[in-house]
Amino acid sequence: MIYEYPWISKILESILAILVIYLLAIFLRRIIRKTVTDPAAKYLVNKKIFYISLVVVVVIIAMIWAESLGSLTTMIGLLSAGLALALKDPISSLVGWFYISGSKIYQLGDRIEINGMKGDVVDISMANTTLVEIGNWVYGEQSTGRLVKFPNYWVFTKGIYNYTTAFPYVWAELAFVVTFESDWKKAMEILQDVMNEVIGDLPDRMKSSLAHAQEKLLIHYKKYTPIVYLQLVDSGVRIVGRFPVMVRNRRGKESELTQKVLEKFEEEKNISLAYTTYRIVK
């Protein structure tokens, strides 16, 4: 009876192929779970098993239905236009996935910003990229704990800011405002000394890392060490310290620098922090 309807046989064969490949993928994942201890390696292997299984299923099903494809040509032609429109975004995201995989515009573990969203890349599927969000209501670009997804086709339409693709360092600034009557030269000296102490040999490591990055990217810095700038503001003299820091250590270094500078300022009688004041003159 089943031979009177060949398409039923092909459907059953297709279902059987999917089931066999699915069970085989589960078996391989269990082996990986027991033998691989590194989370990153385990994640990558599981991803490869998924993609390989998907390709194998598509190839087997195509072979099963190959004889019937000729009679389905007209139907496929009619459906293709509608599918192209309906699946525009998914297809664009799939192309985006190939582009991301080939160009390495960002990779797992990179910290990126796209379309106002910031985070660390924890998953790149064929449709979406998943980030662990940073910033938002949390100061210092630390994690909020939320996961955020965006479609891969955004790589073609949105600007991407990558914190770590070239080298894992950024420049940060820390500012203090002292009164006009304060010894601002001494305040500058204190800030410079504290930055040099806290930052340590990081400028040398940054320079070495940048030299490696310059093999692929035309990036150039003239200065790698901390530097202090001055600016006059309404309430006093603004002293700004600019210093290099590792991407994920920014908040910790800012806190350490602030504490040490404030302690040094407390020891100086002729340095006072300024704040907005109003004078009423009669």
Image (cartoon, grey):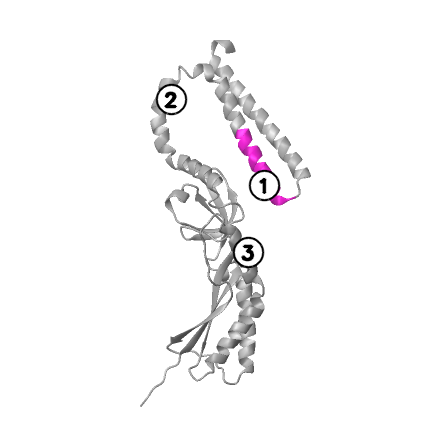
- Among the two numbered marks 3 and 1 on one chain, the one whose residue lies closer to the N terminus: 1
Residue of label 3: 208
Residue of label 2: 76
User: Looking at the image, which residue is at 32% across and 88% down?
Assistant: 281
Of marks 2 and 3, the one in the foreground:
3
Q: Is residue 82 left or right of residue 139?
A: left
**Quarter the C terminus occupies:** bottom left
Q: Is residue 103 left or right of residue 205?
A: left
**Callout 2 crowding tier (Cα within 10 Å): few <14, some 14–19, many ≥20:** few
Circle 1: element type: helix
Residue 43 higher or lower than 250, as above or below:
above
Q: Is residue 269 left or right of residue 77?
A: right
Which residue range is magenta in the image?
38-54
C-alpha gap between disc 3 and disc 1: 31 Å
Residue sticking out furthest to the left: 282
Q: Main secondary structure of the magenta part?
A: helix
C-alpha gap between disc 2 and disc 3: 57 Å
Residue 198 higher or lower than 67, as above or below:
below
Residue 234 higher or lower than 131, as above or below:
below
Residue of label 1: 43
- Among the two numbered marks 2 and 1 on one chain, the one whose residue lies closer to the N terminus: 1
Circle 3: element type: helix
Looking at the rendered structure, the kind of residue marked 1 is: Tyr
Residue 122, given in percent of the width and then of the height, sits at: 53, 46
Q: Nearer the viewer, residue 27 or 170?
A: 170
Residue 215, given in percent of the width and then of the height, sits at: 49, 48
C-alpha gap between disc 2 and disc 1: 37 Å
Residue sticking out furthest to the bottom: 282
Q: Does the magenta run of residues contain 40?
A: yes
Of marks 3 and 1, the one in the foreground:
3
Of marks 2 and 1, the one in the foreground:
1
User: Looking at the image, which residue is at 53% across and 63% down?
Assistant: 251
